[in-house]
Image: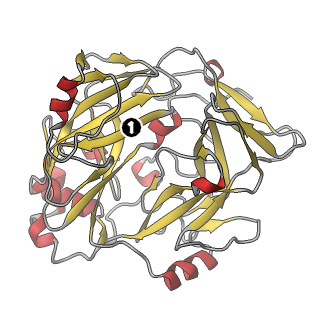
Amino acid sequence: MTDSGSVAATIHAASETGSAGLAHRIGTGVLPYQSIMAMIRAREIAAAPEIEPAQIQPASMDLRLGHHAYRVRASFLPGPHAAVMDKVKEMGGYPLDLAEGAVLERGCVYVVPLLESVRLTSGVTGFANPKSSTGRLDVLTRLIADRGTVFDQIERGYEGPLYLEVAPQTFSIVARQGSRLNQLRFQRGSPIIAASELHRLYETGQLVRSAAPRLQLRDNLVPVTIDLKGAGSGSVIGYRAKKHTDKVDIDAVGAYDPQDYWEPIIYHRDAALILDPDEFYILATVEEVGVPPDLAAEMVPYYTRSGEYRVHYAGFFDPGFGWDGHAGGSRAVLEVRSHEVPFMLEHGQTVAWLRYERMAGHPDRVYGSGIRSSYQNQGLALAKHFRPFAS
């Protein structure tokens, strides 16, 4: 994280060429920090107020809520011939002023125009995920663009505003103009890694570390498994969200007593957990996950035919996450919900897969303590809004 204030001076120092020139200097893949900075300088990413340095991550950027949220009856996509705000009006959406903060109620759906807009050129596509802290609060967020037919994707050539669907599931939240709930990354061409290279990185411990035997790669994806034993009998292996709690301010860090919101799950003798469809859980992987600086990673849910549950909201890992020459020290935290029926998870069960993607260039900064990243060297952990549980 850099000093607060306008990003303009930082952009000027980072690049003296626009992204049209940049296209000739980087390869295909996920665009790194310096490429995002160049896009801002070229006004391919624009905002008012101006973009802040802290929004720019090694391979992604945080997007900010605008000054109004609109409560709507249901989630929607605008389709190829409609603007988002036209659909909001059709659905009778009414505005909430976010200037001083407003409560977004659990169980409701809101559409929020974002402060940022984009003008995607040079074959660039955009992809979005909730931020880790957003997912750990069980807040569903999905990016929408005018004339969009899918969530969380901005097609090449798109020019216009961006919107965020926000649907708190467990806790009501307080949000305001400038709150950052999701992140956007950019990609040029294909980021796919050759299967032989992925296998080499996997076998040499660059991607995951675990005392358990290595599992087989599948469809160029790296498997991760669920930890339901922790440090042994009596240890905490996860957290179950309480119902009917107070609201959570999305911008308040370390402000809440976790005992008011969460129930620890303790391992005794059975390394299994039955997921209740009405509950939300925070769990963790057995594996420690690493992302080398020339790669990024995205967690994809385990195939639905393997069980009726979902294991994450966020799932994007910037270059450098959990990596210091090899994988180690940072586990992937899972936001888990069962679908409609109870489902039993067992220790060591494969629950998700990591898709590693090639960076288009080595990022000028990587995830970690150097930029005050929130979740480096993490174990099982709640969102940053909560203080640690008392021993």
Find residue 41 and report its horizontal and vertical position in percent. 11, 55
Find residue 350 and report its horizontal and vertical position in percent. 68, 58
Task: Name the secondary structure under disc 1.
Answer: strand
In the rendered image, the vertical position of residue 325 relative to residue 333, given as above or below: below
- 152 vs 42, left or right, is right
Amino acid bearing label 1: Thr
Q: Residue at x 58, y 57 (%)?
A: 303
Q: Residue at x 35, y 27 (%)?
A: 74
Find residue 195 and report its horizontal and vertical position in percent. 50, 81
Q: Residue at x 75, y 57 (%)?
A: 348
**Residue 169 in sight in this render:** yes
In the rendered image, the vertical position of residue 219 relative to residue 316, given as above or below: below
- 365 vs 270, left or right, is left
In this view, which residue lies farthest toward the right?
269
Looking at the picture, tell me which residue is in the foreground, 174 or 85. 85
Looking at the picture, tell me which residue is in the foreground, 375 or 9. 375
**Residue 327 in sight in this render:** no
Choose top left, top right, bottom left or bottom right for residue 63: top left
Find residue 331 and report its horizontal and vertical position in percent. 61, 53
Tell me the residue that label 1 is attached to: 141
Choose top left, top right, bottom left or bottom right for residue 277: top right
Looking at the picture, tell me which residue is in the foreground, 274 or 98. 274
In the rendered image, the vertical position of residue 11 relative to residue 312, given as above or below: below
- 174 vs 207, left or right, is left
In this view, which residue lies farthest toward the bottom?
196
